[in-house]
Amino acid sequence: MGLREKILKIFRSKKDTVRATAENAGLPKSTVFHHQKRIDARNQYEESSFWETDVGYGFLIRLVVASIYTFSIKGGLGAGRIKEFFELIRIGTHVGISDSSILLIIKEIEDLILDYKKAKELKIRSKVKELKLILGVDETWFEKMYLVCQELSSGYILFEEVSKDRSADTWHEHIKKTECSITFMANRLYSE
């Protein structure tokens, strides 16, 4: 049994004596007494006792991750602004909301997103046998000359690059740089 489960046992047995709670949780009386004092200190607001339950704890995890994902990763807000939000909704008594802890969670979510991307790419690559691309290339002049490469059957534009010349070597160099774009396009085509 982990520490979280032991603390939940202590919380659930608030009406029992310290001795009875200690026996039920398999902890020393001093530890139970210490955690009961900590639980009382945390439960400052009406909603605080909800955070001590399994459902409340699960909701807190979802709330923190969803807030960080939505506001920071997608919205570009910093850890300080997210900390301010967490203070306003009064979850600081149950969740570590310092700037550094929020930055650690941001980094972990970003790493998980990249791991997910790699796993999906591997899965897609394992299913794709051969993908034939029909590339159309052209030059367009505005203020400068642009090299444009498009996959004709899907309409996906692989690149639009400013260039000084339109030699075969220049085209080959730009197409070689877009191998990751071709992989991405293949992934999109396969998933549709």
Image (cartoon, rainbow, N blue to C red):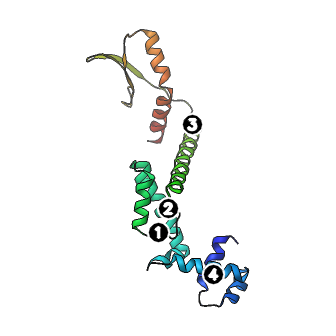
Q: Is residue 26 left or right of residue 51?
A: right
Location of mark 1 (residue):
91
Q: Nearer the viewer, residue 51 or 113?
A: 51
Percent across and percent down for residue 146 are 33, 18
From the image, tell me which residue sits under label 2.
97
Pointer 2 or 4: first along the chain? 4
Task: State the residue at coordinates (52%, 47%).
Answer: 110
The residue tagged 3 is 125
Q: As displayed, is residue 140 above or below residue 155? A: above
Query: Which secondary structure, mark 4?
Result: helix
* First-in-chain label (2 vs 1): 1
Q: Is residue 106 left or right of residue 150?
A: right
Q: Amino acid at mark 1?
A: Ile
Disc 4 target residue = 10
171 versus 42 height, above or below: above
Place of residue 143 in the rendered image (x, y in percent of width and height, measured from the top left): 26, 17
Which-is-in-front pick, marks 4 and 3?
Answer: 4
Mark 4 in CB contact with mark 3 (< 8 angstroms): no
Answer with the quarter of the image where residue 115 lies.
Answer: top right
Q: Earlier in the sequence, mark 1 or mark 4?
A: 4
